[in-house]
């Protein structure tokens, strides 16, 4: 017996709105551009440290501050997506992103840079407002595919940010990267004002008055307490993103110190992650077909293998590159599977479910960044890769512990939201 057979049926979700065919690609594009603003920093860390006269530990902590800002934005901003006009919410928050990017471009010190990076992280969460919006306009049969498509936009945005920042930073300097990002964000803002439908009545549902913001936040807490599957999926995501953040916080320093590779090389290495972005919708389709347990176990087993390759990459560039490719594929496949399941769990509160999942995920990423900055200063790349293996192993052990009661049904799961 699965949990779906004993659990009360969730409240029916409101009917999906009729959306123009171009809306899902627009959401994917907007999500990618918005989230990219939080990732230009990683390949530029060595350049920024040299320019501002600070070491790897200090500038690495700037990356952690940005992720903490993102986690806070997920907690405070994303829940509003369940109750307010998302067009107004997204465009207002994006205005704050553009302003923070301008401050980053002009930052005279690491303290100002850190404060502005926190602001960028706090406001880049519009991507996580748009993902549940995409889920809400898809039917049950295609939701995993649609979510996978929009998440692919996010992943391409992350990868493109690393590539563009590495190449442009080497050619024009890191400040030019942030000036360009500010201009791109303003262009996106105008595009969304034109293309994103307004939702003027969204604050009222079935004749009910506005939902107080405090009640929305309280609902996030209730969701965490009442939904064990959501907690598990959030934990998986946190472990995976801790590996991602640990790796990329230290990678630019490792490539420079061990192999003499600068920002351009970091950009070329980042291109290798595109395969994961292309393949991630396939994981969403497998989850749609009821194979989420298998995909989850495979993803975190592959992640552990990838961290082993990263460790061997301490002195071998080919093995390091292989480790980056495998970990990217594993993280992205696991992430899409997790998100597809989360959106099925509570269709009436997808933005709040996104808050729980993504806040946990980015707290894991922030922990990974802090760990990586300190570990690289103390023990170099071997210490960083050892920590990555611990994060990946923790996720895999959690899956294995939860597997026995689900093994008889793991190849026949009509309700993928009901399994680990």
Image: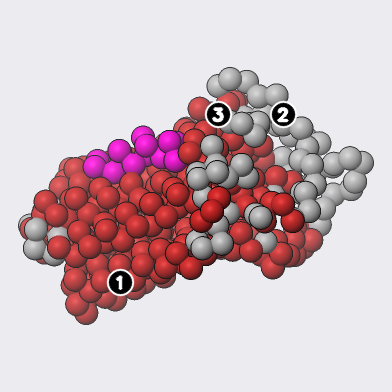
279 is within the stretch colored magenta: yes
- Does label 2 or label 3 sit earlier along the sequence? 2
Span colored in magenta: 271-284
Image quarter (top left, top right, bottom left or bottom right) of the C terminus: bottom right
Q: Residue 155, labelled with which disc?
A: none
Q: Tell me the residue that label 1 is attached to.
A: 387
In this orientation, does residue 35 appear? no
Indicate left or right for 128 with 177 as reference: right
Indicate left or right for 214 with 370 as reference: right
Image quarter (top left, top right, bottom left or bottom right) of the N terminus: bottom right
Q: Tell me the residue that label 2 is attached to.
A: 17
Q: Nearer the viewer, mark 3 or mark 1?
A: 1
Classify mark 3: residues with Cα within 10 Å, few (<14), some (14-19) or many (20+): many
Quarter of the figure with residue 365: bottom left
Q: In this view, does 384 lie above or below 413?
A: below
Classify mark 1: residues with Cα within 10 Å, few (<14), some (14-19) or many (20+): many
Classify mark 2: residues with Cα within 10 Å, few (<14), some (14-19) or many (20+): few
- Does label 1 or label 2 sit earlier along the sequence? 2
Depth check, front residue: 242 or 248: 242
In this orientation, does residue 23 appear? yes
Depth check, front residue: 358 or 230: 230
Residue 67 is situated, as x and y percent measured from the top left of the image, at 44, 61
Q: In this view, does 188 lie above or below 182?
A: above
Classify mark 2: helix, strand or loop: loop
Q: Residue 24, labelled with which disc?
A: 3
Classify mark 1: helix, strand or loop: helix
Q: How far apart are marks 2 and 3 (CA)?
A: 12 Å
């Amino acid at each position: 017996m699965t949990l779906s057979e004993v659990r009360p049926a969730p409240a029916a979700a409101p009917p999906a709105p009729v959306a123009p065919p171009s809306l899902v690609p627009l959401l994917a594009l907007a999500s990618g551009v918005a989230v990219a603003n939080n990732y230009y920093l990683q390949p530029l860390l060595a350049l920024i440290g040299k320019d501002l006269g600070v070491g790897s530990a200090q500038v690495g902590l700037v990356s952690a501050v940005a992720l903490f800002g993102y986690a806070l934005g997920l907690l405070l901003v994303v829940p509003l997506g369940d109750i307010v006009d998302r067009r107004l919410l997204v465009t207002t928050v994006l205005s704050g992103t553009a302003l923070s990017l301008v401050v980053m471009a002009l930052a005279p010190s690491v303290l100002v840079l850190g404060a502005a990076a926190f602001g960028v992280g706090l406001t880049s969460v519009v991507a996580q407002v748009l993902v549940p919006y995409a889920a809400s306009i898809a039917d049950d049969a295609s939701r995993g595919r649609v979510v996978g498509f929009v998440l692919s936009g996010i992943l391409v945005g992350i990868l493109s940010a690393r590539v563009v920042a590495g190449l442009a930073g080497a050619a024009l300097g890191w400040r030019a990267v942030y000036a360009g990002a500010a201009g791109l964000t303003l262009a996106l803002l105008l595009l969304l004002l034109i293309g994103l439908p307004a939702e003027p009545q969204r604050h009222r549902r079935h004749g009910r008055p506005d939902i107080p913001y405090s009640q929305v936040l309280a609902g996030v807490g209730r969701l965490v307490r009442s939904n064990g599957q959501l907690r598990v999926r959030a934990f998986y995501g946190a472990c995976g993103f801790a590996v991602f953040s640990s790796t990329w916080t230290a990678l630019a320093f490792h490539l420079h110190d061990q192999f003499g590779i600068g920002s351009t090389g970091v950009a070329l290495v980042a291109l290798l992650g595109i395969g994961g972005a292309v393949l991630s919708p396939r994981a969403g389709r497998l989850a749609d077909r009821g194979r989420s347990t298998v995909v989850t176990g495979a993803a975190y087993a592959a992640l552990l293998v990838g961290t082993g390759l990263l460790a061997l990459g301490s002195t071998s560039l080919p093995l390091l590159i292989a480790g980056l490719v495998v970990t990217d594929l594993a993280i992205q496949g696991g992430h899409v599977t997790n998100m597809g399941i989360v959106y099925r769990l509570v269709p009436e509160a997808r933005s709040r479910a996104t808050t729980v999942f993504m806040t946990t995920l980015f707290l894991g990423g922030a922990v990974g960044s802090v760990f990586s900055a300190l570990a690289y200063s103390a023990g170099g790349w071997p210490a960083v890769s050892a920590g990555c293996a611990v994060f990946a192993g923790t996720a895999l052990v959690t899956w294995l512990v939860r597997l026995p009661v689900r093994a008889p049904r793991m190849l026949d799961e009509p309700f993928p939201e009901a399994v680990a």
